[in-house]
Amino acid sequence: MKQMIWSAALLSMCVPSFVLAQAETPRMDQRQANQERRIDQGISSGQLNEREANRVNNQQQHINNMEDKAKSDGVVTKKERARINHAQDRTSRHIARQKHDRQQR
């Protein structure tokens, strides 16, 4: 009986930490930070004009909203991760294209 109680107590302590661990997204967060740094660098160097910077910043905000929504239930599923990753890929391409076009400030 004691062993069963201890097992139940241990399980109840482990389950919440397991659920919270799945909601953590360090790779996505790091990638978002890298893309925001690329945007800031493009603005400061003049590679991105104001309109381009606003457009990619709006895309970044959309991705942040997607990530917040995915985390809201405590678990980021594979499907949600794939959608966010796809959106990050797309925004990354947009940043690269806008930084290397011939437009200046």
Image: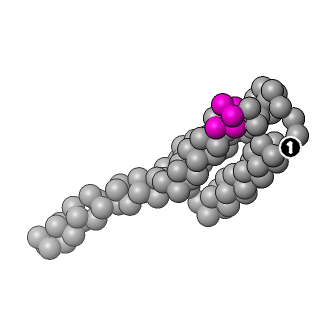
Residue 22 pos. (x, y %):
46, 58
Residue 79, quarter of picture: bottom right
The rendered magenta stretch, by its main secondary structure, is classed as: helix
Relative to residue 54, is residue 64 depicted above or below? below
Residue at coordinates 53% horizontally, 56% vertically from top-left?
27
Q: On the picture, is 2 further left or further right than 7?
A: left
Residue 49 pos. (x, y %):
79, 29
**Disc 1 element:** loop
Locate the C terminus by quadrant: top right
Relative to residue 17, is residue 41 depicted above or below? above
Q: Nearer the viewer, residue 9 or 2?
A: 9
Numbered circles on residues, count: 1
Say which amino acid is labelled 1.
Answer: Asp
Query: Which portion, as a residue range, is magenta?
Result: 41-45
- Residue 65 appears in the picture as rendered: no
Residue 42 pos. (x, y %):
70, 37
10 Å crowding of disc 1: few (<14), some (14-19), many (20+): few
Q: Nearer the viewer, residue 74 or 59?
A: 59
**Residue placed under numbered mark 1 in the picture:** 101
Residue 72, quarter of picture: top right
